[in-house]
Amino acid sequence: MARQDSAHVSDRRRDKDVARFGRWAASYNESRLQRIVFAPLQDATLTEAARELPAPHAVLDIGCGTGLLLARAAGRFPDARLTGVDAAEEMIAVARATAAPGAPMTFEHAAAEHLPFEPASFDLALTTMSFHHWADQPIALAEIRRVLVPGGVFVLTDAFPTGWLRFVMARSRHGRFNRPGDLMAMLRAAGLPLARHVPVPRFGGTVQVVLARATHAAT
């Protein structure tokens, strides 16, 4: 019963988060947070992804919002097929409406726990400041492993409750922030063992880019 109650709490939290981001969609691209927070983190995510996999063929952005990271990825990976998914339908609508004409990108309305793609569809999967909102993180990681080719790269950028911030983030109502060790254990269990992790300098080590590689046998 306790597990069911926890699942219901997670579902309610997810629904509230999705609704909140849906309401934000129309003004999301003009938010000051784009320049101050999101753009630097997207650049850091793509820089580390390119170091790990310089020329991906198919890129998936999970929690893509209005598609700003994929717009940047089009410049970094001009030969890649780019796909974004987001649980907020309003975000996907804006992403489709604002994508550059002819850009090699598509957007799907989907949650991380239920990716609408065939196994081994992508060689690079990305998520930036979205993971802590996911209702069932282990299931979502298993889905990412499923859609990645063996040896494919997963890049996760998120905040971690380190130092005194662990007390603040533990009480956050804006998602589930994981300690680094807990995340590494979830990644291993999903068949996505850690390759390396890189703190993003301007965020004091709280935000890190975590890179994992899909095992050659799905778990």
Image: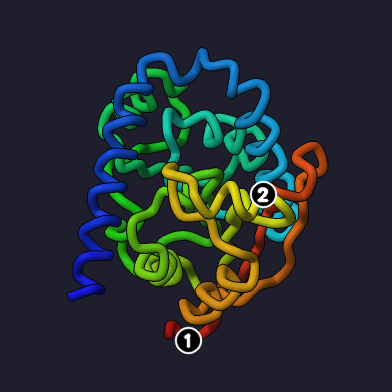
Residue 83's spot in the image, x, y percent? 42, 44
Q: Residue at x 30, y 47 (%)?
A: 13
Specify the farthest residue to the right.
201
Residue 165's disc is: 2
The residue lying toward the viewer, choosing from 116 and 44, is 44
Question: Tag 2: Cα neighbours inside 10 Å, few (<14), some, or many (≥20)?
Answer: few
Locate residue 158 relative to residue 53 in the image: left or right: left
Locate residue 147 relative to residue 111 in the image: left or right: right
Element type at mark 1: loop
Element type at mark 2: helix
Q: Amino acid at mark 2?
A: Leu
The residue lying toward the viewer, choosing from 173 and 124, is 173
Q: Quadrant of residue 153?
A: bottom right
The residue lying toward the viewer, choosing from 194 and 81, is 194
Q: Quadrant of the N terminus?
A: bottom left
Q: Residue at x 33, y 39 (%)?
A: 17
Residue 106's spot in the image, x, y percent? 37, 38
Can you see residue 120?
A: no
Q: Amino acid at mark 1?
A: Ala
Can you see residue 153?
A: yes
Q: Which residue is mark 1?
A: 217
Disc nearest the viewer among 2 and 1: 2
Locate residue 207 relative to residue 18 in the image: left or right: right
Per the model, the C-alpha gap separating discs 2 and 1 is 37 Å
Residue 209's spot in the image, x, y percent? 68, 53
